[in-house]
Amino acid sequence: MVSWRIPTVAATAGLSAACFSYQPLQRPAPVPGTEVRATLATPISVSLGQITVQNVDRIEGLVYRTNADSLVISGSWVRTREGSDFAANGGAVYFTKADLASLEVRRLSPVRSGLVGLVTAGLAASLFAGVKRALGGGGGPTPPSDKN
């Protein structure tokens, strides 16, 4: 018998991740702890532990520190110009704000969240209808009574 738990956990993780999206930063400087995606105008080299990744043009992670002309991100992921992703494992990535092409903030998306809610409600309704049908509920007309 195939366990239903693994597909359920995978579907839940996928649907909850779909509720978030990156949106352009509206403020000039993000506060520390904000989850961001920084796209750089020119690629840089980033040291991740014992390796150095060349041609990094996108960094995702939490803002560690910011001031008037620089930004430090505690990286989750770095992406190279060639499209390779590397886990940054919290490594600090420093660059100046002049190096930025764009800075986006990860936020809850109302549209995506609404769609996930509708899909989840539809799946739950079809699951309950299938169980009801399998157990024989909801079938046939009511039997006649003698009190007519």
Image: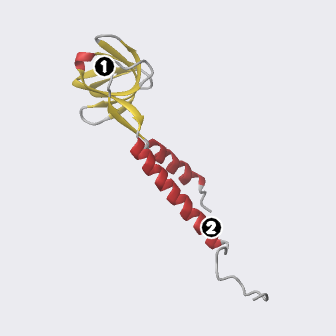
**Residue at image coords 34%, 18%:** 29
Which label belongs to residue 28? 1
Q: Which residue occupies the extreme right position in the image?
A: 146
Q: Residue 120: horizontal and vertical position, in percent?
A: 51, 54
| Residue 142, visible in the rendered structure | yes
Quadrant of the rendering where the C terminus is positioned: bottom right
Q: Residue 116: horizontal and vertical position, in percent?
A: 46, 50
Q: Residue 114: horizontal and vertical position, in percent?
A: 44, 48
From the image, tell me which residue sits under label 2. Answer: 131
Q: Residue 101: horizontal and vertical position, in percent?
A: 23, 25
Q: Quarter-wise, where is residue 126 in the image?
A: bottom right
Quadrant of the rendering where the N terminus is positioned: bottom right
Please state the total of marks drawn on the protein image: 2
Q: Quarter-wise, where is residue 48 in the image?
A: top left
User: Is 145 above or below relative to 106?
Assistant: below
Q: Which residue occupies the extreme top position in the image?
A: 68
Judge by depth and name the residue closer to the eye, 132 or 46: 132
